[in-house]
Image: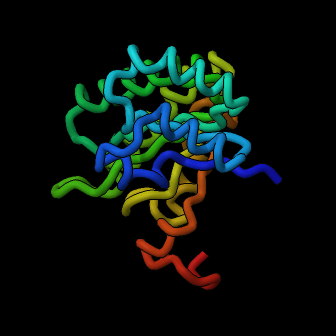
Amino acid sequence: MKLGLSMWSYVGAVKAGRLDVVGFVRECKRLDVDGVELLDYFWADRESQLPEVLSVLSEAGLPCCVYSVGNDFSNPDLAERQKQVERLCRELGVAVRLGAPVMRVFAGDVREGVSYESALEWIVEGLAETSRAAKQLGLRLALENHGRLAGRSDQVRCIIERVRERTGDDTLGANPDTGNFLLVHQDSVEAV
């Protein structure tokens, strides 16, 4: 078994200004982990930081196993959802540059006045389009269980199955975050 570490584990230190992406990679080397997860959330200026991060990853001998991007397909505005797809497709390019074989994505969350059925359709549509782009680049997507639209295992399974029906492939998979299941009260075997 190999151990990777997510930069999200250091969110407090980053917010306090004590750690940046380069510092995180160096910390992972010090901890002797096998790989890192980097998140779009932590770039101060991605284009200027990326060359140094790539250099430090190489020096440390650490792969970027996952690149994670925050997104939300639950917006009722079609133009805003399309911007999310375009953004994810741009971030796929960053994943490629980092050498990450997987990009973690999200569904979105409940919005007032939006039905679950409508949001589900938009999520499937957005993830299907992003999955097609990921497949062309040889990448996989991993949907994290998060929020009330994709927080439960049955919701995640439904989204993945519907995306696979639309794309005809298995580019989209799951990224289970066991702590998130507790947030939607799916904390027992009976709930699964």
The residue drawn where x is 30% and y is 25% is 83
Residue 79, image quadrant: top left
The residue drawn where x is 42% and y is 20% is 49
Residue 27, image quadrant: top right
Q: Is residue 164 visible?
A: no
Residue 111 percent coordinates (x, y)? 22, 54
Note whether 75 is above or below 58 in the view shown. below
Note whether 10 is above or below 91 in the view shown. below
Q: Is residue 181 visible?
A: yes
63 or 159: which is nearer to us? Answer: 63
Q: Quadrant of the C terminus?
A: bottom right
Tally of numbered discs: 0
70 or 133: which is nearer to us? Answer: 70
Instruction: Say whether residue 90 is left or right of residue 63.
Output: left
The residue drawn where x is 63% and y is 27% is 57
Instruction: Say whether residue 50 is left or right of residue 28.
Output: left
Instruction: Say whether residue 30 is left or right of residue 186.
Output: right
Scheme of image coloration: rainbow
Residue 100 percent coordinates (x, y)? 63, 29
The residue drawn where x is 50% and y is 28% is 130
